[in-house]
Amino acid sequence: MAQVRFDKDEFHGELQFYVETSFDGGYQTELSFSEFDDLSYYLRAYYFNNYKELFQDSDIVSLVLTGISFKGRKYGESESFSLHLDEGWKRAIVNFDEKKYGDLNVDKLKRIRDIIIE
């Protein structure tokens, strides 16, 4: 498995939530993160129902994680990735420099992609 590290300045993401309150009904909101430690903190607070740590709203009745997305790009290069998961909708994009990594059977990968799309 190839591993590519991305610069901190070029990584960011969002967690999307549906918040239900006792007074206002409900609304959509998101939390942004730029480090995996922040992502871990948000997910831990969500898992343990510590809604006050995530939002200032004290009237939260329930909280539903509706989506997650994050993107990264290697600074000054064309290599990037993005991942989006949103209420059953999934999408992942990876861009890499084929010449940098040598022959990666690009023709075979393109043919597999064409078969999947058909």
Image (cartoon, rainbow, N blue to C red):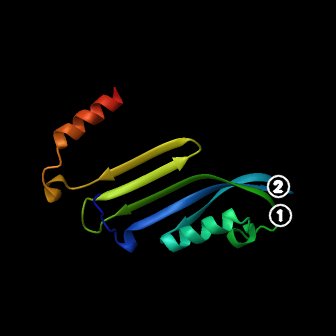
Q: Note whether 33 is above or below 94 in the view shown.
A: below
Mark 1 Cα shell of 10 Å, populated few (<14), some (14-19), many (≥20): some
Which residue is the site of mark 1? 59
Q: Amino acid at mark 2?
A: Asp
Mark 2 Cα shell of 10 Å, populated few (<14), some (14-19), many (≥20): few
Q: Amino acid at mark 1?
A: Asp
Residues at circles 2 and 1 in contact by the CB criterion of under 8 Å: yes
Residue shown at 58%/59% (left/top)? 15
Q: Percent x, y for residue 27?
A: 72, 53
Q: Note whether 78 is above or below 36 in the view shown.
A: above
Q: Note whether 56 is above or below 85 in the view shown.
A: below
Tell me if 106 is positioned left or right of 28 in this view.
left
Q: Percent x, y for residue 72?
A: 38, 62
- For the residue labelled by badge 2, is the local secondary structure a helix, a strand or a loop? loop
Q: Residue furthest front?
A: 1
- For the residue labelled by badge 1, is the local secondary structure a helix, a strand or a loop? loop
Residue shown at 29%/69% (left/top)? 75
Which residue is the site of mark 2? 24
Residue shown at 28%/31% (left/top)? 114
Closer to the camera in the image, 109 or 97: 109
